[in-house]
Amino acid sequence: MSHTAKILLLGSGELGREFVISAKRLGAYVIACDSYDNAPAMQLADAREVFLMLDGEALRSVIEKHKPDHVVPEIEAIRTEVLAEVEANGVHVVPAARAAQLTMNRDAIRDLAAQELGVRTSRYGYATSLDEVRAAAGDTGFPCVIKPVMSSSGKGQSTVQGADGLETAWDYAVANMRGDRARVIVEQFIDFDYEITLLTVRHKDGITFCPPIGHRQERGDYQESWQPHGMSDAALADAQEMARKVVDNLGGYGLFGVEFFVRGDEVIFSELSPRPHDTGMVTLVSQNLTEFDLHARAVMGLPVPDAIRARPAASAVILADRESETVSYDGLAEAMANGADLRIFAKPVTRPFRRMGVALATAGDTDEARRLAGEAAGKVALTYG
């Protein structure tokens, strides 16, 4: 078989789909894995495997079957101790098994940042029961944010204004957690001016930062993002230094999505994912090398530029509003008439608020790009079977 590398992709959603495109452009052979068939990345990959990645034996069996050069996690819910085992036997886990283990759970990465590395974070505590939630909220004060220690794209997250909202928030977090641990993080609500994602690439020649990405969330999930987001030189330097400190500790090569709250010149670490970030979808039009291109280059040991520039651009999500096993899309031509572009993820089923696509736009400034992207997203209509 003629290829530059064999990659086993663990998780095949829309981010994995774009990573497959980038990796295959560099000559890689990709096996896409997920818990359901016909996932977005599987439709473009060379091969597929359908299994639950929290099943350690199934995960180990698939790795042994394919003998990949690189194992690339795209989701959090993975039996990471198996990744540590195969890494010890010479398999390259991206960025490293330790990074996957620590970032699989918000508690581990938060403790690393706040306690071991001394990075500035909000006040926080953990809870495995409603009584512990009440106790933790007593320490953080109100309002506070409650979310599962393991979830993706903001699922299970809510902001609580007072004690009477804690039970509902606890139930919502547990119902939407990933994995098999009923544990939440309760954290102080930061009255921030804005929040950013700082895409940070750790590669064979050092660390490269992308221009900061601003984003807006609802229900804990991103609705739109834009790049570049303006911030003071002091705040940007602080964010870059924090990101460098954390990713250097985690080690390995790849792209990390590092999230921060910013209040004036004060920067507060929020979260980190050792993989492309959903808000980074904007890089599909803002950067010459997308976040997926950069991840693929770093993973495969290829050069990454020292500096990345971004033209003003924005993304806006296209959401489903109900459950359905069949869906079609209308209004694409109208959506693209203002110069915007679209990415339809081709997910086989829908559910309320599931991200089914994204509209992308560039303009002379990010405000105009946001307007164009939002307008385009609003013109895409989903028809359910």
Image (spheres, helix red, strand yellow):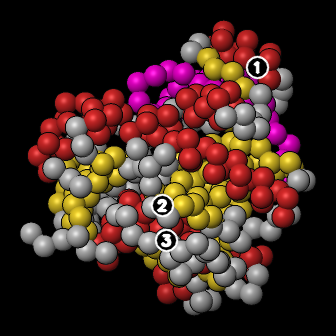
Q: Position of residue 361 (x, y in %)?
A: 62, 80
Q: Position of residue 327 (x, y in %)?
A: 37, 64
- The number of numbered discs placed on residues in the rendered structure image is 3
Q: Which residue is mark 1?
A: 137
Q: Residue at x 63, y 51 (%)?
A: 244
In primary-sequence order, the first of circles 1 and 2 is 1
- Residue type beneath disc 3: Val
Quadrant in the picture for the C terminus = bottom left
In primary-sequence order, the first of circles 2 and 3 is 2
- Is residue 251 depicted above or below 131 in this figure? below
In primary-sequence order, the first of circles 1 and 3 is 1
Q: Quadrant of residue 100?
A: top left
> Is label 1 or label 2 in front?
2
Q: Which residue is mark 3?
A: 304
For residue 203, the mark is 2
* Range covered by the magenta-colored residues: 164-193
Callout 1: helix, strand or loop?
helix
Q: Quadrant of residue 376?
A: bottom right
> Is label 1 or label 3 in front?
3
